[in-house]
């Protein structure tokens, strides 16, 4: 049975490091498939004007298309060039919760993400998406520096 591993991408160098780690792990383990995931932070509870609500669906679709074009598809092409099986997914939601859900849906054995580079007051009060994922995930989480 093919083992699946979720790799969380963020569109930055840190996501590329997580992807490289995942690709190297697949080469060592053998029969594996990567699920390359990008989560667009989106709260269903944010207050919107009536005009913003009317545009919300088209804006979400545009964001998904942009994430596929700029982050997911280039990552999949890179993996394909290395002979690694992979598929991609883009979702809206809380990063930690959504990556955990994607792992569950795909019956993944682990999640690979990069360390958050955010610092300062906000991180000390609320934590980072990476920290929240490590604390709440249903499968092991590998954090790449």
Image (tube, rainbow, N blue to C red):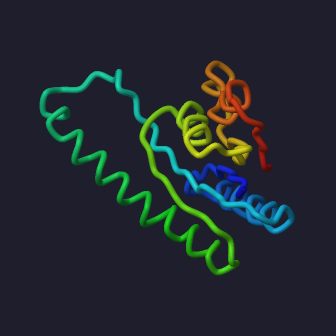
Q: Residue furthest right?
A: 28
Task: Please state if 54 lies on the left or on the right of 26 as rendered.
Answer: left
Residue drawn at 24 percent across, 26 percent down:
48
Residue nearest the observer in this picture, 30 or 142: 30
> Considering depth in this image, is 136 or 11 the residue closer to the camera?
136
Marks counted in the figure total 0
Please tell me which residue is depicted at 72% across the width and 25% down the height of the picture.
Answer: 135
In this rendering, would 99 be left or right of 46? right
Rendered image quadrant of residue 26? bottom right
Percent coordinates x, y for residue 102 in the rendering: 55, 42
Q: Is residue 95 left or right of residue 136?
A: left
Quarter of the image where one finds residue 141 = top right
User: How far across and how far down the image is residue 131, in percent?
Assistant: 71, 30
| Picture residue at 56% right of the left edge, 75% below the top | 77
List x then y, in percent, for residue 79. 64, 72
Q: Quadrant of the N terminus?
A: bottom right
The residue at the far front in this view is 1
Residue 79 position (above or below residue 68): below
Q: Is residue 82 above or below residue 53?
A: below
């Amino acid at each position: 049975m093919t083992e699946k591993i979720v790799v969380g991408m963020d569109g930055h160098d840190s996501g590329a490091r997580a992807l490289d780690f995942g690709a190297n792990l697949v080469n060592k383990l053998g029969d594996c498939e990567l699920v390359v995931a990008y989560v667009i932070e989106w709260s269903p509870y944010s207050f919107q004007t009536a005009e913003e609500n009317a545009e919300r669906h088209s804006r979400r679709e545009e964001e998904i298309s942009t994430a596929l074009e700029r982050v997911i598809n280039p990552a999949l092409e890179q993996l394909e060039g290395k002979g690694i099986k992979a598929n991609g997914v883009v979702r809206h939601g809380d990063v930690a919760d959504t990556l955990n859900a994607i792992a569950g849906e795909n019956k993944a054995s682990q999640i690979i993400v990069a360390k958050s580079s955010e610092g300062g007051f906000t991180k000390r009060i609320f934590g980072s998406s990476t920290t929240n994922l490590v604390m709440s995930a249903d499968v092991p989480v590998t954090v790449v520096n």
